[in-house]
Image (cartoon, grey):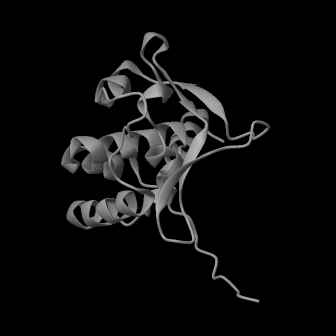
Amino acid sequence: MRTFKRIKLDPPKQSDFKRLLEMARPEDKLCIALSSLYGLRRGEIAGLCGDDILWDKHSIIVHSDRIKTKDREWVRKEMPQDSKSIRRIELAPEVMDMIPHVGQKDFVIRLNPDGITYRFERLKEKAKVTCHFHELRNYSDSIRSEIIGS
């Protein structure tokens, strides 16, 4: 049985977050916003297609993931109907403006999940930030706890 070393999560500070957004390309900025503000995983971000965008409701529907097959191909996989991961998320107008208009079956983000991580690693080195992409998901929780004082 393999054992895994537990990594202490270290969400970015507000100054780190701002620096990442300032230095990011538009596509990377959207990935950072979806992960840090709305808690999406990299596979969920990479799995978003044009038909998941509800422009009139300023929302997205998260119901699929982009996964790697045994043949090392990236495919879009629907989540089971009873999955708690399926959700509708209302986005801020500024985030909606970042989303490109694509065809119904086209991916919103051209990158696969590994590509999202790779680009983020390059960006974080440039921005001198130490967090990992997955830790962005904890950003809104850390800000919320600072505001509420818990």
Residue 124: x %, y % from top left: 29, 62
Q: In the figure, 137 relative to 71: above or below? A: above
58 vs 15: above or below: above
Q: Nearer the viewer, residue 111 or 138?
A: 111
Residue nearest the observer in this picture, 21 or 142: 21
Quarter of the image with the C terminus in it: top right
Horizontal side of residue 110 vs 2, given as left or right:
left
Percent position (x, y) of residue 25? 21, 46
- Taking the spot 49% from the left edge, 47% from the top edge, the residue there is 139
Q: Position of residue 94 (x, y in %)?
A: 33, 24
Residue 123: x %, y % from top left = 26, 60
State left or right for residue 20 relative to residue 51: left
Number of numbered discs visible in the structure rendering? 0
Residue drawn where x is 44% and y is 10% of the image: 56
Residue at far bottom of view: 1
Task: State the quadrant of the N terminus.
Answer: bottom right
Residue 5 visible in this rendered orientation of the protein: yes
**Which residue sits at x=44%, y=48%?**
46
